[in-house]
Image (tube, helix red, strand yellow):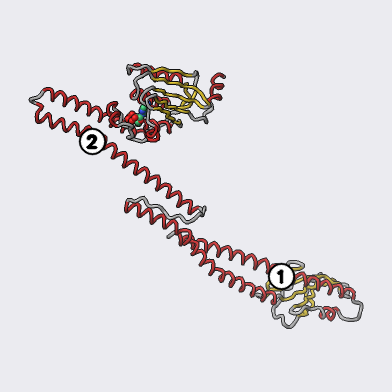
Amino acid sequence: MKLKHKIHLSSTLLMFFVLLILAVVIYYSFSNLAYETEVERLEAEVGVMVATFNANSSEETPDNILRAYVPVDGLIKEKNRSSGLLNTIIQDPSVSVEFPNDVADTSGHMAVEGEQFAYVTAPVIWPGGEVVELIVAQSLREVTANLATLRLVLISVTLLSMIPIFLSSALLGRVLTRPIEGLTGTMRRIQRDGSFEKLPVAGESRDELSQMGVTFNEMIGLLEENYRKQEEFVSNASHELKTPLTVISSYADLLQRRGAQDPALQDEALTAIRAETERMRQLIEQLLHIARRSQAQMDWQKTDLEPVLRQVMTAMNASYDREFRLQSEQPLIVETDVQQLKQLLYILLDNARKYSEDSIDLEAGTDGAVYIKIRDYGVGIPKESLPHVFERFYRVDKARSRETGGFGLGLSLAKELADSLHLRLEIDSIEQLGTTVTIVFSENFNVGELQSGQEG
Ligand code: ADP
């Protein structure tokens, strides 16, 4: 069943039950009230009758006195209390039913042969001294008729009000499901055409349905952006692979044609092929690295930074013929994933090495938050390139990068690492003077608390 039909049916049924319960409650409350009022009225009448009967000193027979008090549509039964025998019945001619000689309570109402009666019992002393119980009853046919009218009115009102309820709940179902139908339609079109279509979101409304539309549009925007990035990435990667492949294939052709006769050419071709193969290997390695990053699990640990930095610096000093200097506060406790932090440091230190000739400084300390600065005194980055250096495959100078072996992937990977480590990366650079990359740790991490904890 469609959602709009479900909403239609359930709200109609719900309203029907609510109205039905309301009508039943109204009917029973009113009928109880009406019967009770009649019983109370009869009690009052019987009270007056008994008082008159007891005060009577005339020669009038008791039956005659009582006859004057027989209620309209009612009767009086006189019953000897000690013998239990019925003396007389004084009955209005309109009463056709046989009223019972015994009743359960002293007053109340009961149905006799389908007709409601109010009744009251009262003992009186007969002139002879015997105690006689009077049962005074009155038909409630007028009240019953009024209640039948009330019943009819309540049923009609309930059924009539179901018409607007039926119509409005159909409208409600349609209004609620229209945006969902729109969403489903758009999703189907996206699936069929592979387009990134957005939903039309009406006005300033802040209701849940427009929120759903806005969220859907945001999600589509994000998917579209990711898709474009992916496309760009694949096209850039293919482009990067094209150059070494062209070089390799050209040299292979040359070797095939003239290699046998020319040992110098053979040598040159093999060197070039090896160099380009190595370049491709490096590129593929970096691409795999990027692909694996999305699945990387973080291993957060409270760590003292100083020994980590020292290990990294020792490794860099041993690997390259360059001076790497470290200056660090001690201890510098942070919460991080050490392996991923080391990877980030290697990328930044490698860049510092590639784009400078002098020594490289690494400084770590606390300035509000914990920071690490990597400073080189090399070529620097032009101001206009600074906003782009974190983009994938962006290189300031393609020719220069090709010499140093970069693909423009290092800093984008560094940015991703920094994001997952909750670190901020800042770059300051002056051309021909050098570059400083600063890694800033999140201030949320309370270093002071940890240090005192350690001391304790
Ligand atoms: P690559 O792998 O080519 O070095 P990166 O993404 O690491 O790519 O860097 C992007 C560009 O930023 C590089 O092409 C380089 O020109 C520039 N760059 C990065 N770090 C430095 C630095 N320390 N000094 C000067 N230029 C740098």
| Residue at x-position 61% and y-position 74% | 152
Q: CA distance from mark 2 to mark 1?
A: 100 Å
Q: Amino acid at mark 1?
A: Tyr
Image quarter for ligand 1 equals: top left
Q: In this orientation, which residue lies closer to the viewer: 20 or 381? A: 381
The answer to whether any part of residue 346 appears in the image is no
Residue 59 spot, x, y in % from top left: 91, 81
Say which element carries label 1. helix
22 to the left or right of 392: right
Nearest the eye: 11 or 98: 11
Pointer 2: residues within 10 angstroms few (<14), some, or many (20+)? few
Residue 305 at x, y = what percent? 46, 21
Q: Secondary structure at mark 2?
A: helix
Q: 193 or 80: nearer the eye?
A: 193
Q: In this view of the protein, which residue sits in the foreground, 308 or 415?
A: 415
> Image point 56% across, 70% down: which residue?
159
Q: Amino acid at mark 2?
A: Lys
Residue that badge 2 annotates: 242
The image quarter in which residue 37 lies: bottom right
Residue at mark 1: 35
- Vertical position of residue 444 compared to residue 323: above or below: below
Position of the N terminus by quadrant: bottom left
